[in-house]
Image (spheres, rainbow, N blue to C red):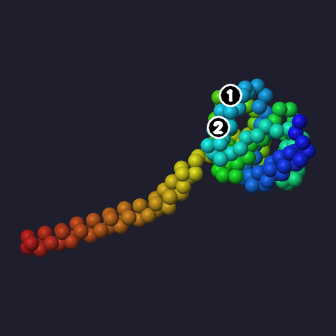
Amino acid sequence: MITREAKEVMLKEITEELKKAELVVVTDYRGLNVKAINDLRGRLRSENCLYRVTKNTMNRLACREAGYDPLEELFEGPTAIAYSSDDPVAAAKVFKEFAKEYEALVIKGGMLSGQVLDADGIKALGEIPPREVLLAKVVGGFQAPISGLVGALHGNLRNLVYAVDAVRQQKESA
């Protein structure tokens, strides 16, 4: 039996983790075995995301104290909560891929930077390309006009060289 003091410490810990989190995901893990849950935890841990199975009452209290009141209604039945203060897209991608492998995992919903998301919102977040790909697209977008300008200037210089060469050849033949 857990003492009241231990419960208060756990509540404070969960509340602090929720306050720091960029992404919070609430799932129903019914139908997953221990091996599958540990696999999910490992994948999430590699993305700096915590996955906890705690009592719904504890999660509701922590959400209330952290200011995440809209999540309270999601804590019905076997529920686990994940929070990531690092890269929310990477964590959402793990959930999306894991849910494909293990259909028993049900994403109930969550929050992204204070914005409530339903299950489809979490899955859509997981479909965003990685940060590096997005940065490469931005850099490519900046590079395209510059490359076009260089090509246009190169063409004008080439035409000037051809014209000067044609004048030179004309003077030599005359």
The percent position of residue 138, horizontal first and vertical second, equals 53, 57
- Would you say 59 lies left or right of 125 here? right
Q: Nearer the viewer, residue 68 or 145?
A: 68
Q: In which quarter of the image is residue 29?
A: top right
Q: Tell me the kind of residue under disc 1.
A: Lys
**Residue at left 58%, top 51%?**
131
Determine contact: label 2, label 1, CB under 8 Å. no
User: How far across and how far down the image is residue 61, in percent?
Assistant: 89, 47
Decide which of tag 2 and tag 1 comes sooner along the chain.
1
Rendered location of residue 59, percent (x, y): 85, 43
Give the position of the C terminus as an image quadrant.
Answer: bottom left
- The answer to whether residue 114 of the structure is visible from this angle is no
State the mark number for residue 35.
1
Count the marks. Answer: 2
Q: Is residue 160 left or right of residue 27?
A: left
Callout 1 secondary element: helix
Q: In which quarter of the image is the N terminus?
A: top right
- The residue to which callout 2 is attached is 42
Q: Is residue 1 visible?
A: yes
Question: Residue at 66% of width from left, 52% of height from top?
Answer: 86
Spatial separation of the CA atoms under disc 2 and disc 1: 10 Å
Residue nearer the viewer, 158 or 144: 144
Q: What's the residue type where badge 2 is placed?
A: Gly
Image side of residue 154 versus residue 39, left or right: left
